[in-house]
Amino acid sequence: MQRNGASNAGLIAGDVLTARQLLAAMLLPSGCDAAYLLATSYGPGRGAFVAKMNAAAKKIGLRSTHFAHFDGLPIPTGSATYSTPADLVKLGEQAMSNSVLRSIVALHSYAVAATAQHHHYVWVTTDGLIGTYRGAIGIKTGNTKAAGFCLLFEARRGKRALIGVVLHVNPISSYAELFATSRQVLNWGFSHM
């Protein structure tokens, strides 16, 4: 299930995983295969899941956001997924109010021991701020040709918290430039609070 260069968590057909494990597989390595399974189960069905995503976006006031696909990737025909920096920050605030999601995105890695129901997995975050930037606690990387490399992030220092987003870092470069830019934004933010 890899289309348009989609990243995956390496899930193996036939394995039975919990929703929390699938969230880790989706959020840490940006596993589109895990997003597919979650959307299929909780739609129920991918189309219904995308409709729920758009209804939730409207409910929390994301006026300039539309989801066309469950994994955020472009689809060959039809409408496109889009958002604005302001909407993404608002989405980040909502997401980080969920304790399960918050605990997962703060992890550098997530290991699942093999059982009779599934193989052994280790998922490592694509968020280069985790473990390298003091106070970084998530949120999510992304990248498409249209959006470039992107990062929605939160960092805390004492009682101060910053949520921000860096969008459209040159897709010719790498995630390194994305994380360097994000560090600059956070350094500026913390120095001006």
Image (tube, helix red, strand yellow):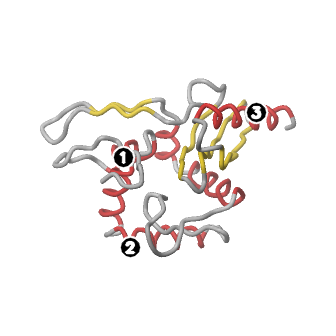
Would residue 113 be found to the left or right of residue 124 on screen?
left
Quadrant of image for the N terminus: bottom left
Left/right placement of residue 52 relative to residue 174 reads left
| Residue 81 or residue 96, whichever sits in front | 81
| 3D distance between C-alphas at marks 1 and 3 | 32 Å
Callout in the foreground (1, 3): 3
Give residue 48's mark: 2
Q: Which residue is mark 1?
A: 20
Q: Secondary structure at mark 3?
A: helix
Label 2 vs 3, first from the N-terminus: 2
Q: Residue at x 61, y 37 (%)?
A: 173
Q: Which numbered disc flags the more N-terminal residue, 1 or 3?
A: 1
Position of residue 128 in the picture relative to residue 115 (left or right): right
Residue 14 in the image: above or below residue 137: below
Nearer mark to the viewer, of 2 and 3: 3
Do the numbered discs 2 and 3 sit on residues whose CB atoms are within 8 Å?
A: no
Q: In the image, what residue type sits under mark 3?
A: Gln
Which residue appears farthest toward the left when viewing the image? 116
The residue at the point 76 percent across, 33 percent down is 184
Given the current orientation, which residue lies at the most extreme right position? Answer: 192
The residue carrying pointer 3 sits among few (fewer than 14), some (14 to 19) or many (20 or more) residues within 10 Å by Cα, namely few
Q: Name the residue tied to disc 3.
A: 184
